[in-house]
Image (spheres, rainbow, N blue to C red):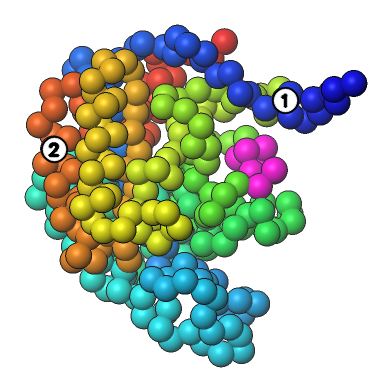
Amino acid sequence: MTPAIPDDVRERDLVGYGSEPPQCGWPDGATVAVNLVVVYEEGSEASVLWGDERNEDWGEYAGEGLQPPRRDHGNEGHYEYGSRAGIWRLVRIIDEVGVPAMISATATALELNPAVAAWMNDREHDLLGHGWRWLPPWGMDESTEREHLGYALETYQRICGRRPLGWNSPHSASDATRRLLLDEGGFLYDSDPCSDDVPYYADCDGRQLLVVPYSKTYNDSRYLASLGSASPSDHLEVLTMGLDQLAREQRTAMMTVAVHARWTGQAARVAVLQGFLDHATKLSSVTLMRRDDIARWWLATVPAT
């Protein structure tokens, strides 16, 4: 007899909107909404300086690098490049093109470099919660994750004068993350899943929360991932081909393009951002939107049932 599918598997939403997702469009008649996400984590990564049991290994080279009690000065310098130079290279391009951006920042990274928060506020870019530090919540017990969420919100309020309306967990969410967001209150949406081309509503303990999907496909972490982009031109091709296909389909869709200060902020790669924005801003069916505005638009045009 064929084994029964476990109930936990059946509880996953593998159907979504099915073959006919909502065709509500976006402002000004656009069919594709592009959300540019600037990821800023520098100084909040795992480190012996924080008293952590490991040093962060998401540098430019494969392997774990030096581990406590030794400092990994090489990897620290890589992160410091993002905060000292990379972020400002991204800022110059975003300011020059004049597009809205979402700043997905860990709270301590902004506290360590408040000029980034000041730029974000001055240009009225929105803020995506990305943890108190860049530590995976699935490595914490629930009480610690709740504590870190509280630390993050307090720090955002103190440094930025506001709290985020959305959340994207460092690395990946835990089993408890969405419930903790709902318990905390004040969140319009969750951006942890990468599971659709349009927003949707997710159930959690009898409550609903809007999900504004993220993307690892259009993320510059592909430079470091196995089978990722071998060169900047590869990554630019992925971004432009993806956007062109979404525009060609003439169906309501969103596209999240994420750039990290320490990766795309490098001169060898930043031309990808410039080229993509130059291309996207020329397409009449494409609009660049703040993530908070995408959430508000969906909440207003596709209400939860």
Answer above or below: position of 241 versus 29.
below
Stretch of the chain drawn in magenta: 174-181
The amino acid on which the numbered mark 1 sits, given as a three-letter code, is Glu
For mark 1, does the 10 Å Cα neighbourhood hold few (<14), some (14 to 19), or many (20 or more) residues?
A: few
Q: Earlier in the sequence, mark 1 or mark 2?
A: 1
Query: Quarter holding the C terminus?
Result: top right
Identify the residue position indicated by label 1 in the image. Answer: 11
Identify the residue position indicated by label 2 in the image. Answer: 279
The amino acid on which the numbered mark 2 sits, given as a three-letter code, is His
Res 27 visible:
no
Callout 1–callout 2 Cβ contact below 8 Å: no
Residue 175 on the magenta segment: yes
Name the residue furthest bottom.
70
Front residue of 132 and 35: 35
Image coords of residue 81 (percent x, y): 30, 74
Answer above or below: position of 173 versus 15.
below
Q: Quadrant of residue 30?
A: top left
Q: Quadrant of residue 48?
A: bottom right
Q: Under tag 2, what secondary structure? A: helix
Work out how far the residue at label 1 is from the one at label 2, CA to CA, in angstroms. Answer: 40 Å
Res 132 visible:
yes
- Residue for point 63% across, 24% down: 13
Most common SS among magenta residues? helix
